[in-house]
Amino acid sequence: MLRVVSWNINGIRSPLQGATQESSNCAAMAMRRILDELDADIVCLQETKVTRDALTEPLAIVEGYNSYFSFSRSRSGYSGVATFCKDSATPVAAEEGLSGLFATQNGDVGCYGNMEEFTQEELRALDNEGRALLTQHKIRTQEGKERTLTLINVYCPHVDPGKPERLTFKMRFYRLLQIRAEALLEAGSHVIILGDLNTAHRPIDHCDAANMECFEEDPGRQWMDSMLSNLECQDGSHGGPFIDSYRYFQSDQKGAFTCWSVVTGARHLNYGSRLDYVLGDRTLVIDTFQASFLLPDVMGSDHCPVGAILKVSSVPAKQCPPLCTRFLPEFAGTQLKILRFLVPLEQEPVLQKSVLQRSNQTQVQKRQNKAAVRSARPRLSQAGSKKGQKNLTSYFQPSSSRPQTSDLELPSLPLAGTLTTPKTPGEEIVAKVAEGQAKASEGKDEKEIQTSFWKSVLGGPSPMPLCSGHREPCVMRTVKKPGPNLGRHFYMCSRPRGPPSDPSSRCNFFLWSRPN
């Protein structure tokens, strides 16, 4: 059996948390635990958010696996995909990108198709974001026949409502993906497209499709219609050459979502959409796919892993393709690191001794030269020093022009107003108690005055309003969408987002924090 898993990890370093900062061994063990938990022969990760200069050896090289990375060349900490293959499923070829511009002609997959409709600048822009990675494997069917299987690990672009030009970019990326996949099929290879396609294909794949305008007319959904076969048509004459493997096995399963909003806490009530797929060519899915599944209980990202099991065995290559990360100069040991130049070289004991003796002789010679310089300086006579330069203490002696004060101390007499009659011990106690109470009340009044003053100046945060649906304290949010309300604060229900029919989900309460 061959088990493949795809997961939008939303940053390859985020599930590892502090392991990468503690030690390289901890990071390697944490990465190995993730791969072991997914329990797959081939693991495809999307949105790694790591560039080559930030990739560390514990993340890239895991014992028992060979890995392949595609990095974003346009932005740091953005996009990126990676594929981890067990040594028992080592690919025969690997390639970065869909266009072939990053191909090295050594160990590449090939089969690019007709890309004349794209310019060189457009192809480079589509591949510069590190959104596609191809690995080609040899598989053996249950009948003993060897076949070629090409996996296309993709992270398709997301369309920001504030950037309409990204829709054009997304559709051009879809078109390039389709041309490359169909070219591989024509060359005789089986093809699996897996990853985050960033489109919910059917209304059953979206939690709120009924309230979305023109759901079926979305360009991304129309492209998926052209790529996928109509499962109701057995001869495959309608639709495209690929099959959505999950819908092939669970055609009517509702709530099968793979992505949820973290801000709204929608995963708690399973209020999301299905954006992650395992698409296989029609012959491969019908003949060799045993199951297709989701793993919603795996946490660590806003997506959950998806995967499939094939009734084939992998035939590993004898050696990894050149794109494998263990062949990168920084990991292969062929590139010197800066720490190499900062490590002191070990010296022989005899050499250390000779250097120490030489330094001691130099210090003795310096002391002798200083002593000779001191003895050669002319010294002033004691008499000359008295007549010539004054001592420092002479400047601090009292001047004779000022009148001398007498050392005789006059007795101090009490003033007339302070003469009092002696008090009895009882009267003294009563007087002390009264004085203490007066001081305490005075200090208390002063403290209360200061407290009330600062309370009037610094009123503190006002209490959160209660939502109308549940009468519970709201949460404050900030508008981040560009427009006239950018930066304004508002209150909304604190419960997680869910279906409107669910009373435990968020209500529609909304209130601006203050007038604009």
Image (tube, rainbow, N blue to C red):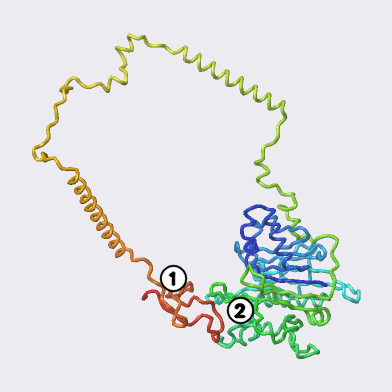
Asked which secondary structure carries label 1, the reply is loop
Give the residue drawn at x 81%, y 89%: 235
> Is the C terminus in the top left, top right, bottom left or bottom right quadrant?
bottom left
Say what secondary structure mark 2 lies in.
Answer: loop
Disc sitting over residue 270 in the figure: 2
Disc 2 marks a residue whose amino acid type is Asn
Q: Outermost residue, left direction?
A: 416
**Which residue lies most toward the right here?**
144
Q: Determine whether, in the image, residue 440 is placed left or right of residue 308.
A: left
Instruction: Estimate the x, y position of residue 79 in percent, counting from the top left.
Output: 63, 67
Q: How many marks?
A: 2
Q: Nearer the viewer, residue 436 or 176?
A: 436
Q: CA distance from mark 2 to mark 1?
A: 29 Å
Give the labeled residue for mark 1.
487
User: Is disc 2 in contact with disc 1, using a CB cutoff of under 8 Å?
Assistant: no
Res. 453 image quadrant? bottom left
**Residue 368 placed where, x, y %?**
54, 16
Residue 58 visible at all: yes
